[in-house]
Image (cartoon, rainbow, N blue to C red):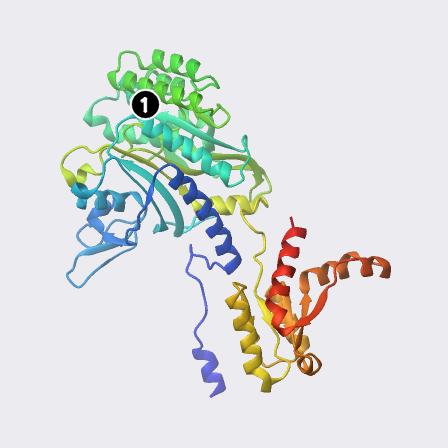
Amino acid sequence: MGKSNKQNKLKARLPRGFVDRPHFNLAQTQHMLATICEVYQRYGFDSLETPMIEYTDALGKFLPDQDRPNAGVFSFQDDDEQWLSLRYDLTAPLARYVAENYDQLAKPYRSYRVGYVFRNEKPGPGRFRQFMQCDADTVGSAEPTSDAEICMMAADCMTHLGIEQGDYLVRVNSRKILDGVMEAAGLNTENDAQRQLSVLRAIDKLDRVGLHGVEALLGEGRMDESGDFTKGAGLSATQIKPLIDFVSAGTNSAQETMQALEKIIGSSEAGKQGVDELTAMGVLFESAGYGADQILIDPSVVRGLEYYTGAVYEVELLFETVNEKGEKAQFGSVAGGGRYDGLVSRFKGQEVPANGFSIGVSRLQSALSALGRTIGDHEEKGPVVVLVMDKDQLPRYQKMVQVLRANSIRAELYLGSSGMRAQMKYADRRNAPCVIIQGEDERANNSVTIKDLIEGKRLSENIADNETWRSSRPAQVVVSEDNMAKAVIEMLVAQEREQG
């Protein structure tokens, strides 16, 4: 019987691309989200929640074929044989929501959303099939001011998360300028749509393959270090030149960058409009006090998604880390977005201007953790634990726990069956700040012993002589049962003060 049960035992295993998240990880995420959302609210954005599941055709990019939707999303059919999908971003559901509630919304409509998104893609380092995003979008404004505000808000989010100026950069460009450069390269017809997409993808890889790699991808193609060959856009040398000049035009001076771009785009009306919009944004950045070390106009930013129609922006972390090969590397982009004036129009049949950006919360948290730059408390403080010294006194111990909770103190009653030593070990593993002990002697005097686990640990590690021990804060106190909550609060306050 025992052998049969062992053979039939279900194997506990986590699906590839997904992660379990223990409480300390969740606490850091909650701190990050509270910080980001406070910045969003300060800029006038209201919260919105949309479902994790949408009709597949509402997501737009991945439409069902005759059997199932294209790869990239997790999809299934309901009992009406309608295709449903887990959302792969928070923007497509917003477009559906705005279109569905268009007449009731104050426009421009400014909202932020927080939630998990899902990608049915091959997982890898820092790439998960389920990850959290925190988006903010404005629907109904075509003004460059709207794009400028998004960029300034992105910078403020990084600053409020404790990332120092110089350790991040918001990089800004315009797809209109790139369209103008494509015109200069002779790629301005509908027949060139696929090659234009190849150009976008090539330029988007600049940070990974360098300028020569982009040049190869714009031409016949590129072979990487492993020997894999990526087919290029097939442009001629004459067509490639304005594109390479374009991505190389960025400087720390917005004025110089704009002058260089004006020369490259020539007579393109779309390009001129893009230059004018970026110029207006640059004036706003300067007037609001954002320097080029925070927000930089950078022609190399294209954002690979084809639905962007105007300004595009990315937030990049600049500090170095070490990759899996032990080589120095930058973590790169942790947020991005842009203007997508055509997305809502899929539902409305008319152009509705919109823009926004998304912070990859899971990626940003992974980046900061990898560098030891943990957001929030490194180790969440556990509950005060009331020990069970005598089973027949459980009602009395339970009352103590309730008194602590009534005074807004996180507390729990030990629920196991072990003795005091094991209970103390349990409290230590729970990262409890202190424990409440009431044995027979304390009970006879209507008192409790409060043992300060944090101070006790510090004393045992750092104090070597009796004189220092006697002059330090006591690691435990005996107080009357009526004064227990007050004494615990004083101990917790002292711990917070000493931990800075």
In which quarter of the view is residue 187 placed? top left
The residue that appears at 33% across and 18% down in the rendered structure is 275
Which element is circle 1 on?
helix
Residue 228 shows in this picture: no
Q: How many marks?
A: 1
Give above or below for 258 relative to 406. above
Residue 494 % position (x, y)? 66, 56
Q: Nearer the viewer, residue 414 or 321?
A: 414
The residue that appears at 57% across and 40% down in the rendered structure is 321
In which quarter of the view is residue 234 placed? top left
In which quarter of the view is residue 257 placed? top left
Mark 1: give few (<14), some (14-19) or many (20+) Cα within 10 Å: many
Q: Nearer the viewer, residue 479 or 420?
A: 479
The residue that appears at 83% across and 57% down in the rendered structure is 468
Q: Is residue 458 left or right of residue 68?
A: right
Q: Nearer the viewer, residue 353 or 332?
A: 353
Residue 406 shows in this picture: yes
Q: Nearer the viewer, residue 413 or 439?
A: 439
Give above or below for 123 relative to 256. below
Give above or below for 452 relative to 494. below
Give above or below for 330 relative to 143. below
Residue 493 % position (x, y)? 62, 56
The residue that appears at 17% across and 64% down in the rendered structure is 79
Q: Which residue is mark 1?
A: 178
Residue 83 % position (x, y)? 20, 55
Q: Is residue 71 left or right of residue 435?
A: left
Residue 53 % position (x, y)? 27, 55
Residue type for callout 1: Leu
Q: Is residue 13 left or right of residue 434?
A: left
